[in-house]
Each structure stands twice: as structure tokens, then as C-alpha cells.
Amino acid sequence: MVKNSNQHIYVGIGTLSVLLLGAFVIYKVSKHKKRQQLIVGNTPMDLSVFDSPDIPGSGNCMDRRLLFMLQQLEARTGYPIFSWINSGARSPSHNRKVGGVSNSSHKIPICKAVDIKAPSRFIRNHLVATGRDVGFKRIGVGRTFVHLDVDDLKSQYVAWGYPSGTPAEVNPFV
């Protein structure tokens, strides 16, 4: 059988095209996965724990200073802070659904607040005191959670209770 003299060129170009396409697909997939993970300090962080339930991927908007301070809180307390996130980023509709205030620091695109589960009063009080020591200047104290935010456009060195307007059971700024 007589082969076309250019056949080896076509096979080579085809093979090269398949390899380049495969490399491009792998690059795009790995880049997409990295968007959901962020390296803060030396630790990879899964930002999906901060997602608004109605907008997958919305945890990417979380303020980087807030994330760093949460890592410090976790290191100082030994508590699994990132496993205890109740609420991070919120869409406007989800914020309304959970009874958040209209100017909530949780709302997208601000993303400067988190609510952390507090399984006991002792843990809640420890989170509040250590949060202050880490540098949080806005702390909401609920019965079963602690709100921490880094919104510099709001009053600083304040603590409040829930429902909104009630004094905090423990105030680290007094």
C-alpha cells in the first residue's frame, strides 16, 4: 500500500491538537477548583462553607482580612471554626429569609461577617473574648452563635444581643 507522503504530517498535527486541547481542559478545570479554595497564610481554605444557600460559589466574596482573623481565632481557641460556620455570604433574599438587617455586613458583595455556632455558653463566651483579642471590633452575641464582622463603615468596639436591640449577655468591650 502506498502512503500519502504528507500523511505523517497530518497524524502529527492531529496528535498535537489533541494534546493541546487536553492540556487546556486540565488547566481550566484546575483553575476553577482553585477559585473555591484560597490559601490564607499557609493553609488552603474551602470557601464553600461561606456560600449563601441560594448562590453556590458566593463564599468567594468573603473579606480576606476576616478569613485571616478567623484562622487566628481557630488557632487560639482550638475550636473547628470553619466547621461551625452558620452563615457567611448572604444574597439579599436569603438575608431577608433569615431575618437579617437590611444593611447586613453578611450581604453580597460586602461579605464582611460570619455567624459561628456556639455549642455551649462556655464556648460562646470563649469565642467572644478571644474574638476581641484577635481584633474583632463588632461582635453579636446570640444564645447559640456568635456574630463577628470587620465592617469598618459601622460603629466599632460594639457588642449586641439578639433579638436585635437587646444587650449582649457578655460584652468584651466593657
Image (cartoon, rainbow, N blue to C red):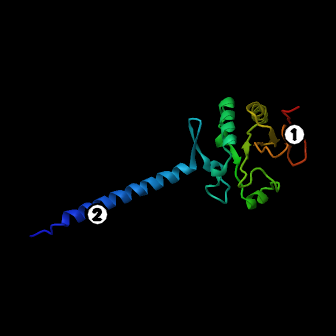
- Given the current orientation, which residue lies at the most extreme right position? 166
Looking at this view, is 22 or 57 the one in front? 22
| Residue in the image at 71% along x and 50% along y | 111
Looking at this view, is 6 or 76 the one in front? 6
Q: Secondary structure at mark 1?
A: loop
* Rendering quarter of residue 135: top right
Place of residue 121 in the rendered image (x, y in percent of width and height, measured from the top left): 79, 36
Place of residue 80 in the rendered image (x, y in percent of width and height, measured from the top left): 65, 37
Judged by depth in the image, the label closer to the viewer, 2 or 1, is 2
Q: CA distance from mark 2 to mark 1?
A: 69 Å
Residue at numbered disc 1: 168
Residue at numbered disc 2: 14
Amino acid type assigned to the residue bearing label 1 in the image: Ala
Left or right of residue 164: residue 84 = left
Amino acid type assigned to the residue bearing label 2 in the image: Gly
* Rendering quarter of residue 134: top right
Identify the mark nearer the N-term, 2 or 1: 2
